[in-house]
Image (tube, rainbow, N blue to C red):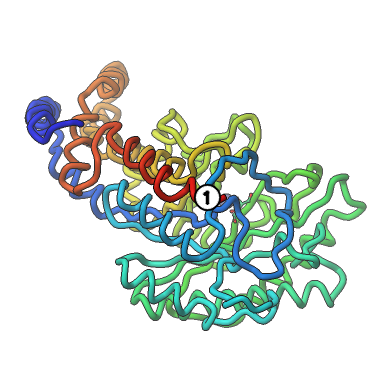
Amino acid sequence: MLSDSTITQAYAAAKERYAAAGVDTDKAMDALQKISLSLHCWQADDVTGFEKQAGALSGGIQVTGNYPGKARNIDELRADILKAASLIPGRHRLSLHETYGDFQGKVVDRDEVAPEHFRTWMEWAAANGMKLDFNSTSFSHPKSGNLTLANPDSGIRNFWIEHTKRCRLISEEMGKYQGDPCIMNLWIHDGSKEVPASRLKYRRILKESLDEIFAQKYENMKDCIEAKLFGIGLESYTVGSYDFYLGYGAKNGKIVTLDTGHFHLTESIADKLSSLLLFTPEIMLHVSRPVRWDSDHVVILNDDITDLAREIIRCKALDKVHIGLDYFDGTINRIGAYVIGTRATQKALLMALLEPSARIQDYEDNGHYFERLAVQEEMKNMPWGAVWDMFCLKNGVPAGEDYISDIQKYEKDVLSHRA
Ligand code: RNT
Ligand code: ZN
C-alpha cells in the first residue's frame, strides 16, 4: 500500500520540479478533474447485451477470450460498472448500447424499443452521479446481414431507420432527464467481403437513410457518426468509410467519431483533430488499441494515446472533444480491463496537461527548434507519476498498483460465483 505521506512527499517534490519548468501541477489536476470519460458498458459482458432474443455477436466485430465472471444480467453489469468506477479517479459517464435496455424479460425488437426501456437506467445513473450516452445497435440481429441502413431492400432498411430514430428519441429523453446532452453514436457495419459492382449505390442509400433519420431535430442529444476501415468478413468495402462520414459530418454539422482502431495502423488519429475542429462542430473519440488490426485491445499508456491527449490539450479543445472508450477484451478480468484502460487515458491527459505548451509554442514561433525538441524530450522524465498518485489520493481511489488487490478481492467474492 502506498501511504498518504509517501504520496504527499513525492508530490511536493514533483510540484517544485514542474514549477521550475513553468507548470502548475495543481492547475493540471483541476483540469483533469473536469474531464469525464464515457465508459463503454460493453466491456463488462463481451458486447452481449440483455435482449431476451439475443443472438451471437455479428457485424464484423469480435471479442476473444473466455475469462470467467462476465456480467450475465443488468444487476451484475451495474455492479461491475460501479466497482470499476470506484477505482477510477473523477466522475465519468456510461455509454449504453440499445441492446442493454431493461426489457424485463420481454422480447422487444429493435424497431419497438422506447425510452421506457431505459427508465431504470436513467434512475440508476442519476442515483450514482453518472450521465449516460447512447448507441444504436444494428449488429447481432437476424436482420443485420451485411447491410442495414444501406440496404437496397426497403423492408430491412426501414426497419433500421425506425430503430435508429427510436434510439435518437431515447437519447433525447436521457439528455433531458440528466440535464446534459446525451451523446448518441451511430455505427453500422455495412459493407462487403468483395468489392461491390457499385460502391456508389450503397453510399447513396446510406446518405438518404441518414437524411431521413436526422430530419427530426432535438435539443438534448448530439449525434455522432462513426467511420471504420473494415470489419471481419467485410474486408473489401465499408459503406460508412471515413471519407463518407467526414463529408456527411462537415456538410450537415454532425460530430464525427474517430475510433483509434478504425484507420490504417500508420495513420495518426492525433493529426486528424485539428482538421476536424475546423469543419465539424465537435469530435467524439473512441479510444481503443488496435494491435495489427481493429483488435480492440485494452488501452495502455502508449505513444498513440499520449499523442492524442497532447493534441486535445494543445488545441485547447477539451470542451469540444468527447472521450469515450471502446475496447473489449474477454481474456482478462473485465473490471481490471476497465480500470487499466480508463486510468491509462487519464494518465495521458494528465501528462499533456503537465506540458509547458506555451513555452514550446514560443520556441517554435521564434525559430528555436532545438529548444522545442529538447523541452519535449525532458518532459518525458518529469515526475508526472507523483502527480497522478496525488490525483488518485485526492479522489479517494487507490494510487499506484493498489487497485490490483481490490479487483482480486472482487473476483474472489463476486465474479467467481458467476458460474
Ligand atoms: C465497431 C465500432 C463500434 C463498436 C461498439 C460496440 O468497430 O468501434 O463503436 O465497437 O459500438
Ligand atoms: Zn468504436
Q: Is residue 189 left or right of residue 18?
A: right
Element class at badge 1: helix
Q: Is residue 86 left or right of residue 43?
A: left
Callout count: 1
- Residue farthest along the right direction in this orientation: 197
Q: Which residue lies at the image location 26% right of the left edge and 40% below the top edge?
A: 353
Where is residue 222? Give x, y as percent: 48, 69
**8 over 125 or under it: above or below:** above
Q: Is mark 1 within 8 Å of ligand 1?
A: no
Q: Quadrant of residue 352?
A: top left
Disc 1 residue crowd, few under 14, some 14–19, many 20+, Cα 10 Å:
many
Kind of residue indicated by mark 1: Gln
Q: Which residue is mark 1?
A: 43
Q: Is residue 3 left or right of residue 94?
A: left
Quadrant assignment for the N terminus: top left
Q: Is residue 87 left or right of residue 41?
A: left
- Nearer to us in this view, 86 or 205: 86
- Note whether residue 116 is visible: yes
Where is residue 330? Give x, y as percent: 58, 42
Q: Which residue lies at the image location 38% right of the left edge and 76% below the top edge?
A: 123
Where is residue 280? Give x, y as percent: 50, 59
- Note whether residue 275 is visible: no
Q: Quadrant of residue 346?
A: top left
**129 over 392 or under it: above or below:** below
